[in-house]
Image (cartoon, coloured by chain):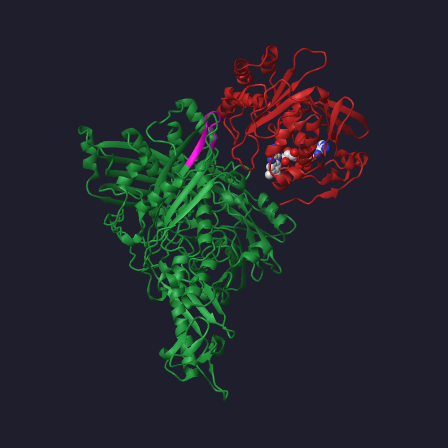
Amino acid sequence: MSRHPSKAGPDSGGLAELRCVGRSAPRVDAREKTTGAAAFLDDLPFAGLLHAAIHRSTRPHALIQDLHTQDARALPGVVDVLCAEQLPFRIGECLRDHAVLAGGKVRYVGEPVAVVVALDALAARRGAELVRPRYHDLPAVFDVDEAMAPGAPLVHPDLASYRVLPSYHPSPGTNVFHSYRASRGDPDAIFRRSDSSRAVFVHRGTYDLPHIAHAQLEPHGAVALWTGPRDLTTWCCAQSPHLVRKVLAEMFQIPMTRVRVVVPYIGGGFGGKSDTTVEPLAAAVARAMPGRPVKLLLSREEMFFGTLLGRGCRARLETAHDPRGRLLAARALLAFACGACGDYGINVVEGAGHVALGPYRVPHFKVESRAVYTNTPFIGAFRGYGHPEVHWAMERHLDHVAQRMGLDPTELRRINLLAPGDEHVTGQLVEPEHGDLSACLDAASSQLSQPGLPPPEPGWRRGSALCPMMKAPVMATNASSAASLRMNGDGTVDLSVGGTEMGQGSATALTQLASQALGMPLEKIRCTPGVDTAHSPYEWQSVGSTTTWKVGQAIRAAASQLLQALKTNAALRLSVPPDQVGWDGSTLWDLRDPSRRLEPAEVALNALFQDGSALGGPVAGWGTFTPSGLNHPDANGQGRLAAEWTFGCQGAVIDVDLATGRIRVLRLVTALDVGRVVNPRLARGQVVGAMVQGLGAATMERVIYDSQGRIRNAGLSDYKIPTPKDLADVDLRVVFLETPFPDGPFGARCLAEHGLVSVPPAIANALRQATGLHMDSLPITADSVLCAMLKHGPQPDRHTTNP
Amino acid sequence: MFEPYRYFRPSTIGEASRLLAFNPTAMLLAGGTDLLVKMRERAVTPGAVVDLKGIPELRSIRRQKHNLHLGALSTVSDILVSGQLAARSSPSHAGHPPPPSTTAPTTGLGCLLDAARSFACFEIRNRATLGGNLANASPGADLSVCLVALDAVALVAGHDSPGRRIPLADFFRGPGRTALEPGEILLGVEVPQPEELRCSAYQRLSRTTGMDLASVGIAVVQRRAPGTSRPRISLAMGAVAPTPIRSPAAEAILNAAPITPSTAVLAGEALTRDLSPRASSLRASPEYKLAVLPHLLARALGRMGLLAAEHMS
Ligand SMILES: Cc1cc2nc3c(=O)[nH]c(=O)nc-3n(C[C@H](O)[C@H](O)[C@H](O)COP(=O)(O)OP(=O)(O)OC[C@H]3O[C@@H](n4cnc5c(N)ncnc54)[C@H](O)[C@@H]3O)c2cc1C
């Protein structure tokens, strides 16, 4: 672990003073979660609960000519059946293109058409099956290229009329609802030169990622209750309660003070519970049932077609290299099959564009990231948020280049890596404080080649590969955080934040940061579980691996305010000026006479004197943080678009069975420059979890559609994700580098999604090294490997050596 | 989400068949690892469920004079445990090289143990029964494939009718369809002449190392009847046809001459010659299944000690 001196602000002190940050404190929710005491949405009791179930479209694209609901209404237990006529709500933060219930036409199989409300869940479900729409089918479009072709069926013919924020660019009359474009220099001239000059090497390729599902343990759900015509409370498992509140307030045109969003423990998010999911529909339905709580809980199957999916990108890349392999120019088109609703994927597409060429220096380029409607369920945030897409394309692409040019794949990367002074696609400068990319490459490389792996079995071949990576959080330019710290009469402190604990460990890390910033023992501080917008401080969203970073900064500010208030009360009691009060985390004293001491509990609420009179007031601190200087891209895609980057490098060693195509991953490595590790065990847990999700994306995961756009594997029997058995023999190695981030708490930057980003290409490139096979579409299953071998045969690559 | 149903737990076979006879929409419940999944999806909605787990005599594995009896309620875990007993009483591997596997050498019932070991997870293995595996009639069901190769016979009881014996070759009629008549209960199976079994193995592939159903599987059994000069091979494949199926052509090749690498290759080719697995499987493409089957055969033969490891790929 390379340690650099800390530059992380006055209250951090030197490293020696970091008492709590850097320790593997046990999870603050460990007991609740292991004993089952932690209450999740479905555990919450409600009196008089009604249940809602959704009738979903069976057609990918069709006009709804008639909706027969009488049979459903007649079913005993059914209270009401609601459709778009009663609930004509349309939402969308950046692009208002999402009707919570399909009105007039359906745009994908699974789209909600009607909601049945009943006294019990079974009656609701049965009722939903009795709703019978009559459809007039329209031509549907599933493939992203077909959707972009001239004359393609339009998923949203009314795109021109939708409300859209200024920095997004829909193309009405097409299926393209947003494009991010950036360019620099004159790439076309370089590609033209390659026609005549042997000094310019050019490679073109196409790289595909399918739609994948988050497969969270806890299904999406919401309970909504209207206690008055303008008073709504929603209990849900949303990653971003404050955003849900904003959407609901706008949707029903009521003040935000009248909308309360309560989030208990969340059973996994991975981006799939960011933005809104089922909350708007649940709230709309409940409005028709005033005074009664209404529950809408998705089944495991509905989690595939009833909420957002991820990825679905086809990337076309062209690069030009000098004879040594140095990148001269690149042209890229990333086309995302975003599904039938764009608002959830629009920033994934935008974010992918910002990093379209990966962690490499490219002097001349032209990139476009395009958001395209298709007649499938829609995509949205998924761990990695545009970055796995880009890295899959770029890292596969460079592997082709290395092989064709006869270069060592790792060397090819090393000579092209971004370094301080280079510019990102967005025009932002790489600064030394952003982290040490080449040190990450070295660290990953050394981990990858550690001894200890068994030799390949007879009939198996081994390969290994390294893929650098970088990730920026994609977020609103004004993505603010707030935190409050309140001291209680016994000297303990309540920490409240609006960032959600969804399993990632933020409650623990944030408690550690508060402990560090206050100088108080961890046991004295409790992070209030759950978020309730009626009480919890504001948080833009818990996404983009930003919670520990952003909320941590807010906590530092809150802590200094709390300490000031504490010293003020103490100063009143001691009759000294506040700057004459000493504090060591457990005791306050008069700096001029250290024998005059106070416990924090004595002055936590006010300064009470012997005659019964009191001065001052309860000790508390409020802190906020807004990443500074972000703005919107200019016409050329340039701007301060990313608030930070985390650099890293990942690698894989695999064996492949030439007889069955089976890939066995022996070792996965991640080196990440995270600035400062707040909690080593939790940090490793996050990164390993992401690596495992990357392993799933690499070798197993894909939403499979039939020719009519129906998902054939909606469920965990046939949507395979890695289980402990798949990991039993994988050597998972994580190394953290610590180049402090000046704008992060005690130097920390984002680290949670990152472990996923370059795992798929590392595995694919290792496979290529082992067999010579280039697999450019995910996932790489045994089936696909064997079929490729039957077609092309394994072509051992002698250039690089096995570890 | 489950439709409401009535639940019965009879304690005798007679009572169970009466319950079936008087409840036309009743279904039998053993471990429930198939039935409850289908009921939750509401692919089936029985009005009544007759739980067989109250009938202890259905859960037994015992050696009889001319056969090995496996009761319908025997769980996959029961088979694993009893396998250790069988291992002691089975003929030794004299004359054969040790199998190239790191696990225990295969015995006569080795294929069932291989299948049981690769089956799901601990929890499912403790619930899932042999009877359920057969009656559910999935084309790739692991135990079913092995029992077909072992020439097992199903024992069936019906209401108001004498019991029947159905050779497993005639038992499966298609995916989810068997020769069982409404109201009939599968009591168990008999594996004939277990003393003739020399060794057997089951090899399967699935999409993941973790829990998954077989994408394709093959069970290979070697017997030697008293008085005959040469042992005989029988084999069955799973997930390549609507039911587990034998390959007479491949068996003929393996039984015509001593097994060598080249006869194994020929048998591998014969295995797949007339197969056309359905293209709609989510688990594996037809091309994949056909390509790996010969290899799985070689692996199974290798595991049985009938083919040296270096010839296996
Ligand atoms: C997570 C999971 C993993 C699985 N993995 C595997 C695997 O690796 N390999 C594999 O082969 N299978 C697997 N299965 C499928 C299933 O576990 C097996 O088919 C199992 O053997 C079924 O037995 P059961 O006792 O649970 O049957 P049940 O679900 O109780 O019954 C299945 C069917 O058989 C009928 N039935 C049961 N007993 C009798 C009887 N005595 N007479 C007549 N009809 C009867 C029932 O009415 C029902 O229709 C898996 C299932 C799950 C849920």
Q: Is residue A482 left or right of residue B184?
A: left
Q: Quadrant of residue B180?
A: top right
| Position in image of residue B170 (x %, y %) | 68, 21
Q: Which chain is red?
A: B
Who's the residue at 47% across and 75% down the image? A600
Q: Is residue A416 left or right of residue B243?
A: left
Vertical arrangement, residue A523 with respect to residue A386, above or below: below
Which stretch did the figure color magenta? A653-663
Nearest the eye: B61 or A677: A677
| Position in image of residue A176 (x %, y %) | 34, 42
Q: How many marks?
A: 0
Which corner quadrant holds the C terminus of chain A? Answer: top left
Q: Ligand 1 lies in which image quarter?
A: top right
Vertical arrangement, residue A417 with respect to residue A539, above or below: above
Q: Is residue B170 left or right of residue A259?
A: right
Q: Which chain is green?
A: A
| Position in image of residue A23 (x %, y %) | 45, 58
Residue A177 in view here: no
